Image (tube, coloured by chain):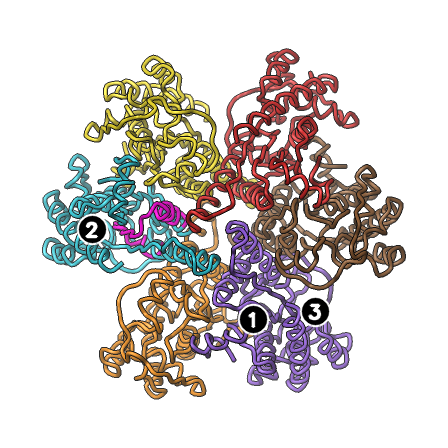
Chain colours: A orange, B purple, C brown, D red, E yellow, F cyan
Amino acid sequence: MRLHLSTWPEIEAYLKSRAEVIVPIGSTEQHGPTGLIGTDALTAEMVAEGVGENTETLVGPTINIGMAVHHAAFPGSITLRPSTLIAYIGDYVNTLSAHGFRRFFFINGHGGNIASVNAAFYEIYAGYAAAAGAASERSNRPEPRCVLANWWECEQVKTLSRELFGGREGSHATPSEVAMTWYRFPQHVKSAHLDPPLAPAGRFFGAADYRSRFPDGRIGSDPSLATPEKGKQIYDAAVAGMTQAFKAFREAA
Amino acid sequence: MRLHLSTWPEIEAYLKSRAEVIVPIGSTEQHGPTGLIGTDALTAEMVAEGVGENTETLVGPTINIGMAVHHAAFPGSITLRPSTLIAYIGDYVNTLSAHGFRRFFFINGHGGNIASVNAAFYEIYAGYAAAAGAASERSNRPEPRCVLANWWECEQVKTLSRELFGGREGSHATPSEVAMTWYRFPQHVKSAHLDPPLAPAGRFFGAADYRSRFPDGRIGSDPSLATPEKGKQIYDAAVAGMTQAFKAFREAA
Amino acid sequence: MRLHLSTWPEIEAYLKSRAEVIVPIGSTEQHGPTGLIGTDALTAEMVAEGVGENTETLVGPTINIGMAVHHAAFPGSITLRPSTLIAYIGDYVNTLSAHGFRRFFFINGHGGNIASVNAAFYEIYAGYAAAAGAASERSNRPEPRCVLANWWECEQVKTLSRELFGGREGSHATPSEVAMTWYRFPQHVKSAHLDPPLAPAGRFFGAADYRSRFPDGRIGSDPSLATPEKGKQIYDAAVAGMTQAFKAFREAA
Amino acid sequence: MRLHLSTWPEIEAYLKSRAEVIVPIGSTEQHGPTGLIGTDALTAEMVAEGVGENTETLVGPTINIGMAVHHAAFPGSITLRPSTLIAYIGDYVNTLSAHGFRRFFFINGHGGNIASVNAAFYEIYAGYAAAAGAASERSNRPEPRCVLANWWECEQVKTLSRELFGGREGSHATPSEVAMTWYRFPQHVKSAHLDPPLAPAGRFFGAADYRSRFPDGRIGSDPSLATPEKGKQIYDAAVAGMTQAFKAFREAA
Amino acid sequence: MRLHLSTWPEIEAYLKSRAEVIVPIGSTEQHGPTGLIGTDALTAEMVAEGVGENTETLVGPTINIGMAVHHAAFPGSITLRPSTLIAYIGDYVNTLSAHGFRRFFFINGHGGNIASVNAAFYEIYAGYAAAAGAASERSNRPEPRCVLANWWECEQVKTLSRELFGGREGSHATPSEVAMTWYRFPQHVKSAHLDPPLAPAGRFFGAADYRSRFPDGRIGSDPSLATPEKGKQIYDAAVAGMTQAFKAFREAA
Amino acid sequence: MRLHLSTWPEIEAYLKSRAEVIVPIGSTEQHGPTGLIGTDALTAEMVAEGVGENTETLVGPTINIGMAVHHAAFPGSITLRPSTLIAYIGDYVNTLSAHGFRRFFFINGHGGNIASVNAAFYEIYAGYAAAAGAASERSNRPEPRCVLANWWECEQVKTLSRELFGGREGSHATPSEVAMTWYRFPQHVKSAHLDPPLAPAGRFFGAADYRSRFPDGRIGSDPSLATPEKGKQIYDAAVAGMTQAFKAFREAA
C-alpha cells in the first residue's frame, strides 16, 4: 500500500488501527561506470514495497535525493546539505505525526545518509521536548518514534553477499546493489570496462578528495559480478531481513 | 532519459552538447475522495517523461513532496514548509549547476508550489550575485536559468479540459488530473460518492480554514467525470503544450 | 489611520471592533533612468493610505525593501533574499496576530515580491498548523488570514493605463507607476533621454542576465509618457480598485 | 538626498566620489499613552535626513521595524526577532556593498536595536572573512565598515535634555523623543492622563515581565513635559551631534 | 558547585530551593604576544567559580568560544558567527529552563560577546512570547531571566586597574586579564618583546581591518605590567564586584 | 599543548610544520545516580590531552556541550539541537582552516554526538565544494579533513573493559567512563544506592521515552564497579588506542 496511490479517506481508515509508516530513503549519486545514479533510491523503494506487502504497512513517498556531498564531483550526482535533509525529514515526519502516525521505519539505501537522518530524528525529538516544556504536563501529542534500517546490513544480505561475491562486494557501487537494480530494471543493465576490476578501498573526506582516491567512483567493489538473477536473490534476502527488523521495531517502539 | 536510470559517464557525455534538465515537481496531498494523494507528482512525472522523450532531454529525479500546508488537515498529506522547499530546490539546482547544467525546466503539477518554487529560483540567483560580488569580475561560473511551467495552464490542456469537462474542471482534484493518473495507473481507479457532485469553490487561507470550507478536499471540481480514456487525451495535450514551452525556454534562456 | 502615528491605547481601542490591518509593501530598486528607486514602496504606501481612509482601516508600517534580486546589478537597488523576506513578514504578522489582528491585506507595488510574500503566508500558516498539532484541539488562537493585492492589476488601473499609455505601459518602470510618484513628489520629477523610447521586453533570469537584456533597467515601457496629472488619475483608479478588493477580502476571510 | 527619491544613474554618479550611506533605523513599538508607536523610526529618519543635508550624504531607506521583543505585550508593537534583523541588515549592507558603498553610518532611534545591529555587523564581517579565506589573497572586494550611532546619546542631546527635562527624561517614551515627533507631526500630538506622572524605572527581561513592571509602557519618563518647541531644540541638537559623529566616522573608517 | 561535577540527583535537589545558575562565557582569540588565547574564557571561569562559592550557586559549563570575528586574522583565534552563538545560548538556556532554572547570570570575559549575547537573550524571550501567544493565557512555564555581567567593568576592578596600571590598561590584551591568567596558570607565563610597549588604540571594523590597525593584536594596552601577584588582586576585585552584581540580579529578577 | 594556553605567535610557529589539531568533544548530561554530568566532556578532554602529549599535537578548546536531546528530561542535562551543533562545529573548523589547519581529529566522549558531528563534517565539505564551484578550478584553499574517533570503541578499551567489568559495562553511565572521571577528580567520587545494580538495556527514542525506560538514567551498566584505580587503567588504554588512531589518520588524510 503506497501512500501516493491511496486516497485520504483510505489513510483515515488505515489510521484507525495502525500507526506505522515505512519511508524509503536513497540518494541520487554516481555508482561507478555501470551502476545507475538512482541505485540507492531504487533499492530502498523496492525493499520498502516488499516489506510493506509482507506486513500490510503503508509505504510513504520515496526520498530519492539524500546526503551525497562526497559524490558531488561526479556529473549527475545531486546532494542535499545535511541541514537541508534534516529540515526535509522533519517536515515529512511532523506532518504525518499530526495525523496520528507514530512509528516511522526508514528503509535506507545509502550509507551517506546515516548521520544526517539520525541527526534529523533528534532534531524532531528536540521539537517535541520543547513543545512539551512550553505546554507543561498537558501536551497531548506523543513523540513520534523513528528508526533507520540499512537493508545491506541485515544478516540475510551480508551472508548472501559473502557467498555470491566473496571479498568483492566493497562498499560503494557494490555488486549487490547494482544487481538488485538490474533485476528490477533489466532494460537498464549497463556495461563498461572496469579498470581495475576490483576498485581501491579506503577512507575519504570531501568531494574533491573522494574523486582523487576513487577515479571511477567505486570503492572496493567489483560490480561486474552483478547479474539480474543474483539481484533477485539479494532482493529477497533484503526484504526478509527488513521485514524482521520492522517487526522488531513495531514491538519495541 | 532519466537521470536516476543513467550512469555518471552517460551524464558526462550528455553535458558535452547539452545543458538542459527537466525537473518534475509535484506534491503529496489529498485529492478528494477519489483522487490519489500522489496525483500532482505522478502527473508532473508523466508529462516530464513525455517531454524528455520528445526533445531527448534529461529528466531529473521527481520532487514528490511540495508545499501543501493548506492540505495539512487531511490525513496522509505531507507538506514542506516554504523555507524547506527553497533550501531543497537550491541544493538540487546548485549541485547540478556545478557540473555544467545551465537550464532548469521545472514541470509542475501543483499550484501550491508556484510561490515557493519561484522564491527558490531567486534565492539561487541571489547566491550567484553574491558570489559574483565577492570574486569581482572573474567569477567564471555563469548563473543557472530556471523556469517553472504548470502543465494544466498550457493552452492545449485548457482547451481540451473545457471541451471534456465544461465548467466542472474546478481547481483542486480536477477531472483532468485525476483522469491522467487513472490512465497511467488503471489498477488504482477509485470510486466514492461525491456529495455534492460539484464541489464548492472560493478562496482559502490556512489548513484549518481550508478543511472547513472544502470538507472532502475538492475545490470546484467534479472528478466523477474522469476516465482513463480522457486521461490519455489530457496527457497528450499536456505533453504537447509542455514540449512547446520547453522549446521556447531553450531558445530564450 | 497609520499605526506608526498612533498610540498603543488607540490600537487597543481599534481592536475592540476591528481585526484588519493594511500592509503596504514595495521595493527599493532601479526604475529606469527617470523612475525613483523607491517607486514601488511609494506607490504601495500612497494607495494603502487611500484605502485606509476610505475604509477607516489601520495601515501598518510600509515594507520598503522587497525581493529585487534581479535588479541587483544596478547601483542603489537593495534586495532581501526570499528567505529574509519570509522571516520578516512572519515576524510582522505573528506579532500583530498575538494582539488580535486576524486579517492582513497587503497592498503590493512590486511584481518581484509576489512569490516570496505568498511563500511567507504559507510559512506562517505552517506555524499555526504545527502549534495546533502540538496543543491538540485546544489551541485557542485562530490562524491569521493574509492576502496580497497588486494595485497595478486591478481592472480600474488596467483599463485606465491602456487608455492613457496604449501599448507603452510595459512591465517595469512603467509610465503608470512613475506618474504616480511624480503626482505625489512633484519636486522629484526626473528627466533623461530614453533610448530607445520604448524599452525591450521579454523574460529574464538572474541579476547579470537582467542587466544584459535591459541595459537601462526598463522592461517594455515608455515612462516619458508619465505626467503628474496622469499620476493622479492612476492613483485614483488604484485606490478605487484596491478599496473594492479590500472589501471583498474582509467579506471572505 | 534620499536613495528612494533618486534614480539609479544618480546613484551611479554619487558613487564616483563617495562611498558613504546613512541608514536610519528605528522601531515600531508602544511609547506610552501619548507617544507615537513609530517614534523611534520617525526620530531616526528626521535626524538622518538632517545629517544627510548637512554633509551631502545619501540617506538609505528607513528601517522602521526593529528589535522590540520586550514591548510585544502592548497592542500595535511589532518586533523582529534578533535573527531576522541580523539577516535583514546583512542583505541591506551586502547589496549596497556590491555597488561600491563602503561606509555605513546607522543612525539609531531605539536602544533595543543596539545588540542585534552590532551582532549584524559582525555577521557581515564574518562573511567577508570567509570569502577572503576561500579566495585566498585575491579577494578584491574590501570589507564594508559599519557603525551604529544613537542620537539620544550624543553630548549635545544629553546636555539639552538635562536642561529641559531635569531628571524626568527617563529611558523609554522620553519627553525628548516624544517632543521631537510632535515638532515634526503637530497634527498627531496626543494627550492622556499620565499616572503616575513620572513612570517607574528599573531593569526588565521579557515581554510579560516588561508589561508587569511598566503598566503604561513608559520607563522612568514624564512625557507630559514634551512640546513641539522643545522637540525642535532636541532635533537641532541631535542633528548637530550626529553630524559630528558622522564626520568622525568618515575620517576613521 | 559546578554542574559538570555534579550528578543529576544533586541538581534535582538544588532546584528545590534555587533557580539561579551562573554561566561563564569567554572567547578563544589572540591576546597579543604574551596573552593566552584562552584568556577570556579562563578569567570568566575563574570569576564565576569565585562567585559560585561566595553565594553557593551552581556554575554551568563554560562557554569557551565566543564571537571573535574581528580577531579571525590571527592564527589560533576561533570565532562563532553571531547567529551561531545566538542559537547556542538559546539551546543552553532553554534546556535548563525546562528543568526549573529561571535566573541566568552570565559572567563575561570578552567585550566582543556583548552584542551577540544580548541578542540571544531577546531571541529566547521572543520564543516565550510566541509560545505564550500560541497557548493563550495558559502557558504555564514562566520566562527565564538572563543578564550579562562583564567582570572588567565593575567598579572594584576599574578602580584597582587604574591604580595598578594607570593609563596603560587599554582595551584588549590588557594587563588586568593577562595578569589574572598568570595568577592561575603560573606555568604558562609568557614573555615577548612588546613593540611599542603601549599598543595603539582606536576603533576597528572587520578582521582584516583589525589586523592592519593592531599588528600584534593588542589595543591600547601594555601587558608587560602584568604579574601573577597583581593578577591575584584583580581576581579578588572581580569576584567581589561580580558577587555584588549577582546578588542585585537575584533581588531584581 | 593546549590552544587556549598558547599565544598566537606560538600557533603561527606551530603551523609552519604542522596542520593537525585534536578537538575534544563531550556532552553535559545525566550519567546516572553516581556519574558526573560532565563525564563525557571530562573523559574526552583527558584522553585528548594524553594524545596531544604523546604526539606533540595541539589540542583545541573542549566542546563541552553536545547533542543530548534524549537526556533532556533529567535535571541538569543540557543539549544542543543537531542543527546548532552542526553550525558550531562548522564555525570551529572553518575558522581554524583559514589559518592553515587541515586535519581535525575529534576525540569523542559521547555516542549521541556521532550522527550530528558526522553531519557537521559533510556540511563543511559541502561549503568547500560550493566555493570550489563558484571560483572554478582556481580555489586555492584545500578542503579540511575531519574525523571523529570514539575513545570507548578502540580495541584497547574494549578488551580492558570486558576484563574489568565483564558484562556489566552497558552503554550509558558505564563503569569505564565513571571510573575515568573518578581517577582524575577523586574529590568528586559520588555514591548512591543503585537499584537494580545492573540497569536495564534496550533501544530508546525521544527524551520522555528515554526517561520512562531508564528511570535513573543508566543503560545496561553497573557503575558501582568503578574505582579510581580502574579509571587509571581505562585512561591509559584509551590514550594508547586514540594515539594509534590519530597516527593512522595523519597518515591517511
In contact (CB < 8 Å): disc 1 and disc 3:
no
Between residue D8 and residue D219, name the one nearer to us: D8
- The residue shown at (47%, 71%) is A62
Q: Chain of mark 3?
A: B
Magenta highlight range: F87-116
Task: Give percent across and percent down for residue D227.
Answer: 73, 18
Discs 3 and 2 share one subunit? no
Secondary-structure class at tag 2: loop
Name the residue carrying label 2: F174
Q: In the rendered view, does E97 fall on the left or right side of F191?
A: right
Secondary-structure class at tag 1: strand
Name the residue carrying label 3: B171
Between residue F45 and residue A168, name the one nearer to us: A168
User: Residue C26 bears which disc, if any?
Assistant: none
Which residue type does callout 2 highlight?
Thr
| Quadrant of residue C8 within the rendered picture | top right
Q: CA distance from mark 1 to mark 2?
A: 51 Å
Secondary-structure class at tag 3: loop
Name the residue carrying label 1: B23
Q: Is residue C136 magenta?
A: no
**In the picture, which quadrant includes the N terminus of chain C?**
top right
Discs 1 and 2 share one subunit? no
Q: In the rendered view, does F101 fall on the left or right side of A21?
A: left
- Viewer-side label of 1, 3: 1
Q: CA distance from mark 1 to mark 3?
A: 23 Å
Against D218, residue B5 (above or below) is below
Does any portion of residue B76 appear in the rendered image?
no
In contact (CB < 8 Å): disc 3 and disc 2:
no
Against C61, residue A77 (above or below) is below
Q: Residue furthest front?
A: D16
- Viewer-side label of 1, 2: 1
